[in-house]
Every structure is written in structure tokens, then in C-alpha cells.
Amino acid sequence: MRSSAQRPLSGIRVVDLTRLAPGPYGTMLLCDLGAEVIVAGGGRAGPPVSTFARGKTFITLDLKSSEGRDALQRLVSTADVLIEGFRPGVADRLGADYAAMSAINPRLIYCSLTGYGQSGPRAQDAGHDINYLAYTGVLGSMGPTDGPPALPLNVIADMAGGGMVAAIGILAALHERSRTGLGQHIDAAMVDGCLSLIAMHFAVWGTEAMPGRGDGLIAGNAPFYRCYTCADGGHVAVGSLEPQFFQALWTTLELGDLPDHMDRRTWPDIEARLDAAFRSQTREHWTAVFEGKQACVTPVLTPHEVWQEPQIQTRIDPASGEFSVPAIPRFSRTPVAAGPTDMRDQSVEVLSSLGLDDDLIAKASPAHERGQTIGLGWPPVFNG
């Protein structure tokens, strides 16, 4: 059991039954904010992603056994939040549904995080980030006009529309509980999160601002809002959308008379001239040239290069490690921190603190898993 005194969520206990990425990402945010997060694994659940394991405590419970279910109930009686990511109906069969858990602890905030939500014709469908993006119009609006849609990794549906939205819902429910004293059920669906994230673009779809996929002011084909290749094969990102930024871009490159960059007829010439200019020198050259110019031109960094950037180092302690980034805002009074990663199975320690004796612990938690280091769920292991 880790102490998180004086952090914003100090004293909040979260029981995490989720796997893969969305739920663990959301509970990592809560953990960074000071919540105590106990991850209860077991059964056919895959190993957790180590990136999202920091600060958490891991135990193993066999929820198909009466002892395992009893242990979960004992744990839930001490908790403020439970989050699960099963398909609708699975938690019911395990005796871990909201009705059962809230009967034990009426103050419990119970969050169900799924792809399509708890109701509707697709509620039982399997899916991944790519499917939720496809189903909500996000994927259909991204990528080049002359090719298939482009995948933005799994950061939109899984992380932002899933884990982050679930964390926001949990925080809101905790605040509401402070007034009423009652918990409630949160139905967090990744498709809902995606629809919220793309709301601004729905409004302009089919207009001059965004006529179609890969076409529009910020879709990637406008010459003042795209990436360019440099002489060394590196790239720069140009976001000179507003007039003052475009003027700074154009004058810094010394390209002559300033064109009307909002007139689509000028786009081919602007693109050709910018492309030729950026190809003439290296990425590092252009990084130095645009330093302080307020033209919204930045180098496109690889993940390994990010940690050497002075701006990043002012926000994140380089000594904290590559993945130990507190992924939440900074607070003026209350500290936040990425806790240490300890993926040992601590079932005995946690369950004994709840009053279970050795015999019950042995029946509730598979002996062959207790005390072991939890395996890594990412990257996956490929055969062949």
C-alpha cells in the first residue's frame, strides 16, 4: 500500500479490473494525482502494460471462485472507485456488477469503460481503437485524399476518448458524492469520447474549411499547415495558419511578396516554394532559423529525441526516466508525481490487510501467481 499524502487525490482508493490500454491509462492518471490504485488481475486477463503500471499495486484474484469474489467484495467495501472494462454482462456473471458492488458500498463510484457502451446494437461487439475511430467519423476524416485513411496510433479512442474521459467522469462523480454522499454508475464509451473529440470538425465537414478527407485548412493539404522534408531527410512541421504567422514564415524564408494564403488558387505555388526552401537545408538549420520567430515552425522529433529538448526538460525532470511523465496538469499548491513501478504480485499483503487469513488467501488468489512479477503486456510477443 503506497502513501500519496498531500496530493490532490490522497486518500482515494481505486480498484482497477481493466486490461489493455484505456482503463489502465485512466487509472494511471488517477494514481499520478495521488489515488491508491489496486489492480486486481487473474483469469484469462492478459498482463498489464508496464508503461501504465507506475505507482500501482498488483494483486491476483480468481473471480470465478467464491473466495475470490468474497475477497473482491471485501476490497470494494474499502474503496472509493471501481473501474472495469468487461463487455456488458460479464461483470454480472462474475458477481462484480454495479448492483452487487453498490449494495456493499453505496458510496462507490463504479465506472464501466467499453468501446460502444452498455446499451445499443453494438454493445456486445469486440473492437479496438481503429474500429471506434472508424465508427465515429474520426478515421474517415484523416489521411490523404488519394489513399486510405491514416491511423493516428491508438491515442484518440483508447487514451483520450477512453481512459481520459473515464477519469474525468470519475472525478466528477467523486465531487458529486461530496454533496450527496452517494456513489453512482458511470457508463464510459470510447465511441462517445471520439464523438466529443471530433465535434469541432463535424460542424465544418463539407464546407470550404474541410471539404473532405485530407482536404482543408488543417487536414494536411494546405501548404501552410503540413510537414516538409529537409535536406537531411528530417522534417519540420509548419502551422502558420493565421496571417501573422504566415507572414513570419514567408519573410523568414525571404520568399518575396506575400501571397494571400487563404486563396486556394495560391496553394500550389506556395507549396512548391516552401518545399524547395525547406529541402535546401537540414532540419537543424531550420530549427535554428525559426527560433523565436513566432511562425509556428518546429522540428518533427522522434520519440527518442523528445527528451533532449530544453522545453520538455523544463516540464519533466530528465532524471525521472523516459516513461515516468506525470500526465496531468501542474498544481500550484498540491504536488503530483509519477510513482515507482512495482509489478510484483502483492496479493498476500493486500488481502491480509483486509482481514483474510492464509487459507482464504490461498483460495481467493492462485498460488502460482502470487508473489511473482507481473509480465509485460506491451510490446506483444510475436511468434514465427
Image (cartoon, rainbow, N blue to C red):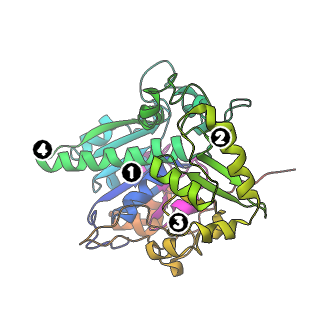
Determine the residue positioned at 35% across, 70% down: 336
Residue hosting label 2: 151
Magenta segment range?
A: 40-67
Q: Is residue 337 visible from the viewing direction of this image?
A: yes
Which of the 4 quarters of the picture holds residue 79? Answer: bottom left
Q: Which mark is nearer the camera, 2 or 3?
A: 2
On the image, which quarter does residue 126 sit in? top right
In the visual, does 43 lie left or right of 96? right
Element type at mark 2? loop
Residue plotted at (61% across, 69% down): 289
Q: Nearer the viewer, residue 140 or 156?
A: 140
For residue 116, above or below residue 362: above
Q: Nearer the viewer, residue 105 or 206?
A: 206
* Alpha-carbon span between mark 1 and mark 2: 38 Å
Classify mark 3: helix, strand or loop.
loop
Residue corresponding to mark 3:
345
Judged from the image, the secondary structure of the residue bearing numbered disc 4 is: helix
**How far apart, in angstroms, are the residues tagged by discs 1 and 4?**
25 Å
